Image (cartoon, grey):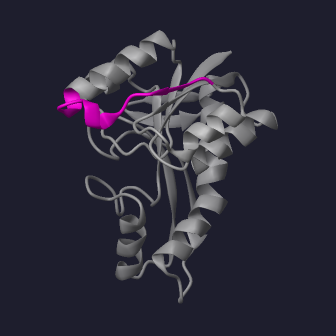
Amino acid sequence: MKNIVVLVSGGGTNLQALIDAEKSGLIQGGKITCVISSKDGVYALERAKNNNIPARVIPRKEYPDSKSYSEAILNALNEEKADLIVLAGFMTILDECVTKAYAYKIINVHPALIPSFCGEGFYGLKVHEKALEYGVKVSGATIHFVNEEADAGAIILQGTVDVQRDDTPEILQKRIMENVEWKLLPKAASLFCQDKIEIIDGKAYIKD
């Protein structure tokens, strides 16, 4: 059974999707063993508490820079014996000391179809604002491995939704979360925990 550590910074809706999936048996071969938050007092910590999942708070504001903060996160991940790390609304970019130590073991959900509307500065509603500005007819979410470059790791899964004429960024965000993010993030975690993802030439493939 692989240890899944979930990193959060806010309300924890993606964390809840993972918890629900684990409870219903959709995540095979893995268990959420710890939640780590970059802020105190966020609702994601309540979700962990309500489901008897151990939680730790490592406040970003207490560290002078990304490297020192990332080192603190790395120590916690090592202590928790993390096999898989899931970034679920974690709003801090981790230094390469973490991404190299856990290469192809960190997954993130990005609310667009990479390589569109991604990279530094593209997060939250900004992604959906840009997609609507551009006039795309479909959007969606991408589950990918995390490497040293923002949103540039190997793509594991992608899913789409249709963009409607009267969509606002908030409406599109909700549709993508409910129809893609909350389904594909647990699916990717399960595939990882069952050793069903293989990396060939830097690309991720799902084994049959």
**Where does residue 129 sit, x and y in percent of width and height?**
38, 74
Q: Return the residue found at the far bottom.
A: 166
Q: Return the residue found at the far front.
A: 41
Query: Visible in this render: residue 111?
Result: yes
Residue sitting at x 44%, y 38%: 40
Residue 188 is inside the magenta segment: no
Residue 118 found in image quarter? bottom left
Name the foreground residue: 23 vs 162.
Answer: 23
Q: Return the residue found at the far right.
A: 24
Residue 102 found in image quarter? top left
**Where does residue 121 sit, x and y in percent of width and height?**
27, 57
Residue 187 found in image quarter? top right
Q: Is residue 190 left or right of residue 8?
A: right
**Where does residue 181 sit, x and y in percent of width and height?**
58, 53
Query: Visible in this render: residue 194?
Result: no
Residue sitting at x 49%, y 42%: 41
Residue 58 is inside the magenta segment: yes
**Where does residue 195 sit, x and y in percent of width and height?**
61, 22
Q: In the image, is residue 119 above or below residue 208? A: below
Q: In the image, is residue 74 above or below residue 45? A: above
Name the foreground residue: 72 vs 82.
Answer: 72
Q: Which residues are magenta?
A: 54-67
Residue sitting at x 51%, y 73%: 170
Count how many numbered circles sit on residues in the image. Answer: 0
Name the foreground residue: 60 vs 172.
Answer: 60
Quarter of the image with the N terminus is top right
